[in-house]
Structure formats: structure tokens, C-alpha cells
Image (tube, grey):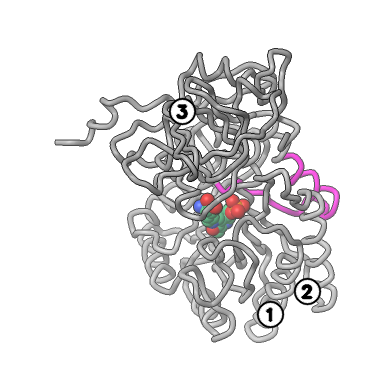
């Protein structure tokens, strides 16, 4: 199957983290997000261990919590010694609510509000990753009022165009995030930041995109960022002690996907940084990375109950499930690929072609089209694999459908980590 965490048991049912998915669906109801804690922890360790091996541990691995943010996930990341990247007051609040050490929190975003910045500074977050001049000024003023000095990174667009979906490319000049290098914006921002009394410029950040399969763009980013750091050192006598290369490491959604291992990704990045630093005669910075998808994405699946199965002669078969774009908007948004398995028939051949539709009042509410699975019938349990990243976190209440519950499994044992929404929850803010 897609990952080592997913298998089939003696009953012929699909398992994740040694838990029987059909039993999970019966016990917790559907739709249900299921996360394999052991596999998530393994992913965290693979990144950390690789930096220990290839960079003497002079690195910070931050979990990009936008991929899947809830209290338990911050607890898991913290217990693995990871920091986190947050992009809103809400993510920050959730992390702080479980006692996540503020110094290990990096605050991102292209339009942080003054309230959010104040909230972050009040709680002494580790770094604010400043996106634009307005934010730089606002943050400096807020820090001055609080009599604090904020540790910041500047978000740079390194001018790298990666091979991924248009919506998740972020390294090129025409992008809403950060300061461009090509037109001198980034350099001017450094000059400004160095002049502000209440800001401490620790270094720079870049994030070139998401679901990237090659190591080459990350190597290129290393060269560009160290080259920029050297220019800053030469012209302004400032040295960056930290360079953050963002996330973006691709995962296996389909059997045919072949992502680079975490260790190989880290080795490629650290080799490139070491080489660039040697060429430029620049002190080795602390490297920070922010993997999100590669921590949680493939360690998970979503379970649905099959309802109506509609075969339109000479057209296609629609298999309707009890969730849809509300809990997984990624096919509707990006045409994202997924493997689908009938969990209670997992040993049978996947020789039936169908389109899996959700229950929203919208034709585009599809999870996957013309995809292979076992012959499916009403009442079957369907598993959509590798849904851990950007599913729950992008879920909505469209059509006032309740958001699903989430469970964490660990070696066969399951525990609820997010309760299923109720109709009461749906109306609780209505007046
Ligand atoms: N750091 C920054 C600054 C980011 O913007 C992102 C993702 C990450 C780290 C984590 O990237 P990852 O390792 O997960 O690729 N909703 C889209 C993905 C949007 C990614 C946004 N930024 C999707 O469902 O594919």
C-alpha cells in the first residue's frame, strides 16, 4: 500500500497504524479523519535525525501547522522537539493553549493584523517572519510600545519557479508573499529593518512552493539565499545567523509517486548550504525548515460511508459518500490525486472505475474522478488515502454539514482528538 502504516488484516479490512478502519468507522462514525501517530512521529524524527547527521544539529525543524492544526498535533510536535510555524492568531492561540513554548513558534502571514502582532509579541513568539514594509513598521511600533525588541526574519522571494500546481507556487516574483530579490525590494527591507530600534533582524526566510519532488529547487534556494546574505554582509556589515528555507517536501499520494526521502532532502539542502557558504566565505547559519504535508499528509486517511451508487449508462458511475468537498476541498481546488480503497473489501482487486462524489449541493463536489477501487456497494466503507494535510485544516461547513471527527491511532489503539461537530455547533454563533 501507499505507506508502511497502511495494510490489510486477516478479516480483509484496511488498517492504518494496525487499527482496523472498518471498526474505527463503526466506533467513531463517518466521515472520519484517521491519523497514525507512530508514523507522524517517525516523520518528525527523520527530519531531525538527518540534520543531526548532516549538519551537526545546527537546525530547527518547525512543523507547518497550517497542514493540520489542532491541540493534539501541537502536543505531538512539541514532544518530538519540533517548533511550529503558525499563520494566524487562531493557530497561534491553539498552540499556546497547550503550552507550546512560544520561543519555538514562528509567526508567518502576508497580512498579519496589528492585533495579531500584538498578541504574538505579548506572548513572546520566537520569530515574526515579516512579509512587507507596512508590517515592519507596525511591528516596530507595537514592540516600542511594549518596550520589547522583536526577533524577526524577512520573507524573501528567491525568484525560483518550481514544478507544482500554480496555486501553491510561492517563490516567484509575481506572488503575494514577501520581498522580491530581483528588483531590490529585499535589500531595501533589510536596510530598513536594521535601522529600526525595536526589531532584531536574525535572518531571512523563503518558501518556494509545496508538493515538490525534486531537490534541485531547494539547492538553488540555498545558493540564492546565501548569495543574498553575502551581499548584505558586504554592503551593510550584517550577518544572518539563521536562514529558513520553508517547507514543500512532496509526499506520495499515488502509488506511482516517488518522493525523495526526508534524509536525502535534508542532505541535498545542507550540502548546498555548506558549499555556498564555503564559496562565499560565509559563516554557516542555523538552518530552519518548515515541513507540513510531509509530517502529516501520508500518515492518514479519511473514512466515508457509501450511500447512493448511480450508474449512468455509457457515462460513468457516481459513488456518493457522506462527506465531500466540505472535509476535502483539494480535488475541487487543485484537481488533487488520491488513491481510494473500499476498506471492507481491501483484499479484492481494485478493478472497478468510479467517480467519488460528496453530498454537497454542487456538481464540482467530487473527491476523485474515474478512479480505480474495489467493486463498491451501498453501506461499504471507503478510505481515501493520504488526506492528513490540508483537509481538516481547509474544511468548511458548506451546506451546514458538520465537520468530521478526527482520531489518532497508535499501534492499534485509537483515541478521539477532534470531536465531530453537532448541529448545535453549526448554529452556535447565529443570533
Ligand atoms: N512554510 C510556509 C511559509 C508555507 O507557506 C507553507 C505552505 C509551508 C511552510 C508548508 O508547506 P508544505 O511542507 O506543507 O508543503 N493548501 C495547499 C497547500 C498550501 C501550502 C501553503 N504553504 C494544498 O492543499 O496542497
Q: Earlier in the sequence, mark 1 or mark 3?
A: 3
Q: Is residue 392 visible?
A: no
What secondary structure is found at the residue carrying circle 1?
helix
Figure check: 84 above or below 35: below
Dot 2: element:
loop
Does residue 181 show up magenta in the picture?
Answer: no
Give the Cα distance between marks 2 and 3: 52 Å
- Disc 1 crowd, CA 10 A, few/some/many (<14, 14-19, 20+): some
Ligand 1 lies under 8 Å from the Cβ of mark 3: no
Which of the marked residues, 2 or 3, is nearer the chain's N terminus?
3
- Disc 1 to disc 2: CB gap under 8 Å: yes
Q: Which quadrant, please, contains the N terminus?
A: top right
- Within-10-Å neighbours for mark 3: few <14, some 14–19, many 20+: many
Mark 1 = which residue?
233
User: What residue is rendered at 62% in x and 23% in y?
Assistant: 409
CA–CA distance between discs 1 and 3? 54 Å
Residue 341: give x, y in percent of width and height: 62, 31
Residue 168 position, x and y percent, is: 54, 61
| x and y, in percent, of residue 320 in the image | 44, 33
Task: Give, as a single range, the part of the protein colored magenta.
Answer: 44-64
Name the disc covering residue 31, or none: 3
Residue 62 falls within the magenta-colored stretch: yes
Image vertical order of residue 161 relative to residue 263, above or below: below
Instruction: Name the residue tied to disc 2.
Output: 282
Secondary-structure class at tag 3 = loop
Q: Measure how far apart labels 1 and 2 are at the Cα level.
A: 9 Å
Ligand 1 location (quadrant): bottom right
**Percent from the top left, x then y, of residue 146?**
38, 57
Amino acid at each position: 500500500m501507499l505507506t508502511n502504516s497502511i495494510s490489510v488484516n486477516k478479516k480483509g479490512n484496511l488498517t492504518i497504524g494496525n487499527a482496523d478502519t472498518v471498526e474505527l468507522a463503526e466506533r467513531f462514525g463517518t466521515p472520519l479523519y484517521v491519523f497514525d501517530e507512530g508514523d507522524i512521529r517517525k516523520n518528525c524524527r527523520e527530519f531531525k535525525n538527518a540534520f543531526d547527521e548532516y549538519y551537526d544539529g545546527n537546525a530547527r525543524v518547525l512543523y507547518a501547522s497550517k497542514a493540520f492544526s489542532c491541540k493534539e498535533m501541537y502536543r505531538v510536535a512539541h514532544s518530538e522537539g519540533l517548533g511550529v510555524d503558525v499563520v494566524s492568531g487562531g493557530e497561534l492561540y491553539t498552540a499556546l493553549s497547550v503550552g507550546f513554548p512560544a520561543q519555538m513558534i514562528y509567526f508567518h502571514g502576508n497580512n498579519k493584523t496589528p492585533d495579531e502582532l500584538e498578541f504574538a509579541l505579548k506572548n513572546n513568539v520566537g520569530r515574526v517572519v515579516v512579509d512587507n514594509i507596512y508590517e515592519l513598521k507596525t511591528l516596530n511600533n507595537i514592540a516600542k510600545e511594549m518596550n520589547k525588541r522583536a526577533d524577526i526574519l524577512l520573507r524573501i522571494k528567491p525568484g525560483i519557479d518550481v514544478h507544482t500546481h500554480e496555486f501553491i507556487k510561492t517563490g516567484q516574483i509575481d506572488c503575494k508573499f514577501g520581498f522580491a530579490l530581483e528588483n531590490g525590494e529585499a535589500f531595501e527591507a533589510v536596510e530598513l529593518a536594521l535601522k529600526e530600534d525595536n526589531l532584531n533582524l536574525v535572518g531571512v526566510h523563503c518558501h518556494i512552493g509545496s508538493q515538490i519532488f525534486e531537490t534541485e529547487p531547494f539547492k538553488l534556494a540555498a545558493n540564492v539565499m546565501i548569495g543574498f546574505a553575502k551581499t548584505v554582509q558586504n554592503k551593510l556589515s550584517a550577518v544572518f545567523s539563521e536562514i529558513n528555507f520553508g517547507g514543500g517536501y512532496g509526499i506520495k499520494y499515488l502509488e506511482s509517486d516517488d518522493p525523495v526521502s526526508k534524509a536525502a532532502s535534508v542532505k541535498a539542502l545542507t550540502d548546498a548550504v555548506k558549499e555556498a557558504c564555503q564559496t562565499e566565505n560565509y559563516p554557516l547559519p542555523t538552518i530552519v525548515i518548515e515541513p507540513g504535508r510531509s509530517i502529516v499528509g501520508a500518515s492518514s486517511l479519511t473514512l466515508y460511508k457509501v450511500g447512493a451508487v448511480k450508474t449512468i449508462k455509457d457515462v460513468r458511475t457516481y459513488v456518493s459518500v457522506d462527506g465531500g468537498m466540505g472535509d476535502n476541498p483539494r480535488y475541487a481546488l487543485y484537481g488533487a490525486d488520491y488513491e481510494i480503497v473500499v476498506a471492507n473489501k481491501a483484499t479484492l482487486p481494485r478493478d472497478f472505475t468510479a467517480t467519488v462524489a460528496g453530498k454537497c449541493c454542487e456538481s464540482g463536489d467530487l473527491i476523485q474522478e474515474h478512479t480505480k477501487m474495489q467493486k463498491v456497494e451501498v453501506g461499504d466503507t471507503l478510505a481515501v488515502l493520504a488526506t492528513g494535510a490540508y483537509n481538516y485544516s481547509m474544511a468548511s461547513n458548506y451546506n451546514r454539514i458538520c465537520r468530521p471527527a478526527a482520531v489518532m491511532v497508535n499501534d492499534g489503539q485509537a483515541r478521539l482528538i477532534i470531536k465531530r461537530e453537532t448541529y448545535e455547533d453549526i448554529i452556535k454563533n447565529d443570533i
